[in-house]
Amino acid sequence: MHPASVFDAMSARMAEDLGFEMGMFSGSVGSLSVLGVPDIVLLTLSEFAAQAYRINRAGNLPLAVDADHGYGNALNVRRTVEELETAGVVALSIEDTDLPRPYGTSKNRLIPIKEGMDKIRAALDARQDPNLVIAARTTVGITPFEEVVERAKAYATTGVDALFFAGMKTREQLEQVSDAVDLPIGLGSTPPVLSGDLDYLSSKNVKSALQGHLPIHAAMKAAYDTLKALREGTPPGEIENVAGGDLKDMMIRGKDYKAWLKDFLASG
């Protein structure tokens, strides 16, 4: 399955209307849509959870989220699970990257495996809804791949529901992980060698493979180009690729609101 990358209420409605099975709201997309800043953990848990809530209340698209490092230590992870579960997400991942990046470091690094395990155990302990899926996430490329497999095996012993891997590059890497653990696998933005064959991915127990976060980047480009054209004097009637009335009405659920206005506000 390829989830839809969503960033607000309207993008989630679009994904639902187009038939996507699930939406994905990531920390990087949250940083862009809420704050307009890079993905360096400046977004707070409350801001992230509030945006997830807004996305969820807009429709019925199941929403998975990237909860970064849980916004702190294992006790912060507990709070993260509580807040995101209350916001209505169906799945979340907790990663083992050392975040925010400590002073004096120039590259990303991972926390010790034992600390990563304790964070996952804290997340599982905080869960109240047994249907909430919790995934342990690690990143390929920061450490030797042998350690990626070691981390996958260790996290699997916590009772976590799934494993999520960012930065997976080759089929050989995926096969090593799939052979090492018997858990559902999620993949971050995948290269063509991994993303094109859903039957192959399914055979390796991959349940979710992201396709990047193109929707918010496309929206950014469209808004910038429109504003630039208007600023430079292009008449509004000559601006192209603007949503027409039918699409707008569908996205704001105009028919529903017209019916409610008639049913509940009409006189007599």
Image: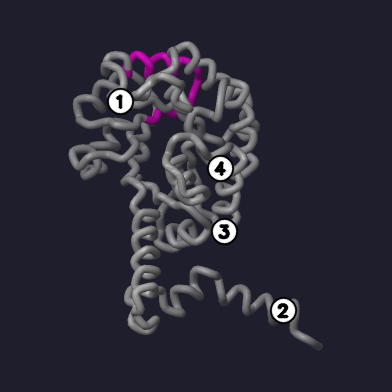
Upstream in sequence: badge 4 or badge 1:
4
What's the residue at 19%, 25% (across, down)? 172
Q: CA distance from mark 4 to mark 3?
A: 16 Å
- CA–CA distance between discs 4 and 1? 25 Å
Task: Give how far apart the Cα atoms at labels 1 and 3 are.
Answer: 34 Å
- Mark 2 = which residue? 263
Q: Is residue 13 above or below residue 171?
A: below
Compared with 47, 102 (above or below) is above
Quarter holding the C terminus?
A: bottom right
Q: Secondary structure at mark 4?
A: helix
Write down the residue under mark 1: 140
Which disc, if any, is residue 48?
4
Residue 58: mark? 3
Q: Are marks 2 and 4 in contact (CB under 8 Å)?
A: no
Q: Residue 247 placed where, x, y %?
A: 44, 74
Which is in the foreground here, disc 2 or disc 4?
4
